[in-house]
Image (cartoon, rainbow, N blue to C red):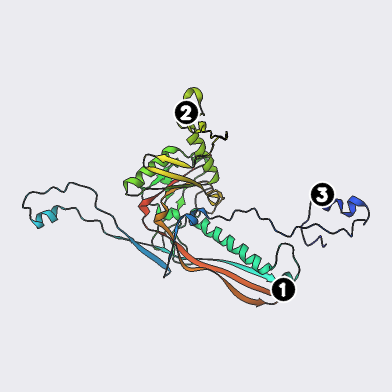
Amino acid sequence: MAATNFATGGSKAAARSASATGNSVNAGEREDLANFISMISRDETPFMSSIGKTKATAVFHEWQTDELAAPASAAVAEGVSYATQNAAQAAEPFRTRLGNYTQINSKTVTVTGTKRAVDQAGVADEYAYQLKKRGTELRRDVEFDMVNSWNSSNGSGVRKMGGYQAWINDASTALNVLATPAEYTAPTNTGAGIAGTFTTVTSADKASLQLSHIDTVMQAIYENGGKATKLMVSPANRRVFSAKAQAAGSSTSNAGDGNVRRNVDADGKLRQSVEVYMSDFGDIMVVPNYVMGISNTGISGLDDAANFSAFVYDPMWFSYAALRPMQEVDLGQLGDSIIGQIVEEGTIECRNPKGCGLIFGLSGQ
């Protein structure tokens, strides 16, 4: 075995080394290498999997929204004329045209001829294995851009789709828990808009997730005509939420022993996790998203986007619009290597931004 080419370790490798034995008595011993490869990395895409799928037919994907006029008294006098009534009637809300640029996402694969020819443990074809691995990575990258990049919709240079945060730029549906709310500028969802920017937001400016934050966003969504059904948070904020929900209703004499904590089933299992939150404006399912907990320091003015936000939304208002579904492009031979590329192009369609909300400025603690 060529120890300089492959990482090895463990007690057996140490026992077989020349320094350990002082001779080559074990040189002919066969290595015991299992014929599989174990990978622990998560490959789920919680947000993308929760929303629908649709088709984009242009680089700038557009759709329309509409809403009813606000409720008001419609009483009129007997025999009122059309002109009088029409003049007094409030202007009807006009349809709004929204759009998002498609984003090209890609990964490349390069495998030498030798690598495909040798007999490898756990891999029948190195090129096919790498294609599958890169494809999984690409799906996770798209999830990252959707939930953790604070991108605006941008059609110049490298096109970028506006992520979830780009649609929550209406003050009536966003909740800002930053110490100084004016420090934040929301990204835009039309044209070559600005990205979400912050002015010197550090850990000291962030706050812990509270149940009241969720209630406030749920109320705003309800008053706008929507009904959120999911709360998506990072793993750290998932624990914060459960702790806050467990403590809700605790007495001062028995702090920390909330009503939920007393839920013990017939098998004696103590239920720590809270999966469904029953708010005043409907039930929402609490879903952890590991991508929202990934460190991202590339946002202007923000020290780190990890654990920074929580989504309150109804999946029915979102879709992933694919212009080009994910496909593998075989680029052929490059010298003694076979090369390929995985490409896809698509964008987020937020059918009605008033049906979703955002809690941000969270510390994850």
- According to the picture, the residue beneath numbered tag 3 turns out to be 11
Q: CA distance from mark 3 to mark 1?
A: 34 Å
Looking at the image, which is closer to me, 206 or 285? 285
- According to the picture, the residue beneath numbered tag 1 turns out to be 113
Looking at the image, which is closer to me, 251 or 166? 251
What SS does tag 1 mark?
helix
Amino acid at pointer 2: Ser
Q: CA distance from mark 3 to mark 2?
A: 51 Å
Label 1 or label 2, whichever comes before in sequence order: 1
What SS does tag 2 mark?
loop
Name the image quarter holding residue 123.
bottom right
Q: Residue at x 57, y 68 (%)?
A: 342
Q: Residues within 10 Å of mark 2 (few under 14, many from 20)?
A: some
| x, y percent for residue 32 | 80, 57
293 on left or right of 168: right
Quadrant where the N terminus sits is bottom right
Name the image quarter holding residue 65.
bottom left
267 on left or right of 314: right
Q: Are circles 3 and 2 on residues that touch, CB within 8 Å?
A: no
From this view, report whether residue 70 is shown above or below residue 255: below
Amino acid at pointer 3: Ser
What SS does tag 3 mark?
helix
Looking at the image, which is closer to me, 327 or 123? 123
Give the residue furthest to the top.
253
| x, y percent for residue 350 | 40, 57
Mark on residue 250? 2
Q: Residues within 10 Å of mark 3 (few under 14, many from 20)?
A: few
Say whether residue 158 is visible.
no
